Image: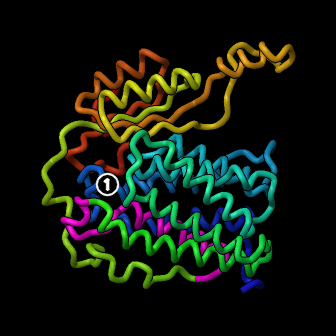
Amino acid sequence: MQTKIAANTHAMKRWLGKAETTLGNHSDRLNAINIFPVADGDTGTNLYLTVRAAAAAFSDRSTADEPVNDVGVVLAAAGRAAMEQARGNSGTLFAVFLCALAEPLAGHTRLSAPLLAAALNRAQIRAWSALSEPVPGTMLSVLEAAARAAGECDTAHNGDDSNQALGLALDAAVNAALDAVVQTEDQLATLHAARVVDAGGVGMLLILDCLRSAVLGEELQDELLDGLHGYDLQDPHIHAGMPADDGVEVMCTISLSPLSAATLRQRLDELGDSVIMSQVGSASNPSGSNGAGDDDDDDEDAAEASYRWRVHVHVPDAEAAVAVIRSLGDPTDISVSQLSMPRDPGLPAGQHGHEY
C-alpha cells in the first residue's frame, strides 16, 4: 500500500478529476432518487457541475504567486472556484466542504491521517453551520460520520502520519460514509416513504471514495453502491411521481460585512427555507487600512471588513428575495430556477429562469 500512496497536490488534482468523471457517470441515478429537500431531480447534475468547476481550477488558475506544492493552497483555489459556480443545495454544500477542508491543510505538502481527520472535522462543522436549518439524514450526516471515523482511526494510531495510517483512515472514512448513507433512509420521513437513500449523501460517498482511490492508487469500489434502495438502474425516477414543488431557488454572490450577512440570513429565513450562506475567500477592507494603529481602530476595521458570500435560498417569490438581497449590497451572478422542473445543465448560471 505504502509504495502506491501519493497524497500531494497531484493526488488532489486526480481526486477532483476522478470525482468529476464519477459524478458525471452517476448523475442520472442521483437525480432519480433526489426528493429532499425538494423533488426536483437535479442533485446529480448540481454536484457534477460544481465539482467540474473545482477540477477546472487546477488548470485555470495562475501559479505565479502560489506554492504549487501546498495541498491547502491548491484545494482552497479549487474551493473558491466551486463556491463561485456552486449549483443547488448539494453543490453549495460541496463547495463549503472543499473550502473548509483546505484550511487545516495550508502549509502542508502532503496529506496524512492526522491532517485528514482535522480537515474532515473542519469541513463537517462548516457544512452544518452554513445551513440555517441543518437536517440529519442528508449529506451532512454522511460528512459527520466520515469525519468521526477518520478521527477515531487517527486517535487509535496515536497521530501516526505514515502512509499506512493514512490508508487506514481513508478506508474508515469511506466505510463510515457508506453506513451513514444507508441510515438516511430511516432518518427522513420522505425518504422512508419512498424507500430511497439520500441523493446528496450518495454523492458525498462517491466523492470520498474518489479521494481514497486517488490517494491510494486503487480503483473505485464498484460494489460500494450495491443494495442501496432506489439506486439500481431498473429503479424508476422517484421524483417524477412526486407533487410539483412551488417556488424558486435563488442564488447569488455578494460582498457584505459579517453583521450585514447575519441580517441577510435572518431576513431570508423569514422569506423561505434551505438558506445556505458561506464565505468565499478572505476579507477585504474598503477603508484601505494597512493594519497599523491602535486596537480600537483594528477592531473597527474588522467589523467593517467586507467578505464575499455565496447565498442560496428557496422562496415562493424571487422578486421579494432579490429585493432583500439588493437592500444590503450589490449581488452578482444572480440565478433563479424553478423548483418544479429540472435545470438544463447546458445553460450558464443566471439563465435557468428570470435574470435580475
Name the residue beneath numbered marker 1.
Answer: 42
Residue 342 point in image, percent of width and height: 26, 50
**Is residue 350 among the parts visible in the rendering?**
no
Residue at the spot 72% in from the left edge and 53% down from the top edge? 104
What secondary structure is the stretch in magenta mostly built from? helix
The image quarter containing residue 295 is top right
Relative placement, left or right, of 148 versus 32 is right
Relative placement, left or right, of 241 versus 187 is left
What's the magenta region? Answer: 189-218
Is 267 in the magenta?
no
The image quarter containing residue 30 is bottom left
The image quarter containing residue 101 is bottom right
Closest to the observer, 280 or 37:
37
Q: How is the image coloured?
A: rainbow
Q: Amino acid at mark 1?
A: Asp
Residue 8 point in image, percent of width and height: 75, 66
**Is residue 275 among the parts visible in the rendering?**
yes
Residue at the spot 60% in from the left edge and 43% down from the top edge? 80
Closest to the observer, 190 or 199:
190
Q: Is residue 338 above or below residue 317?
A: below
Residue 29 point in image, percent of width and height: 31, 68
Is 213 in the magenta?
yes
Residue at the spot 30% in from the left edge and 50% down from the top edge? 37
Q: Quadrant of the C terminus?
A: top left
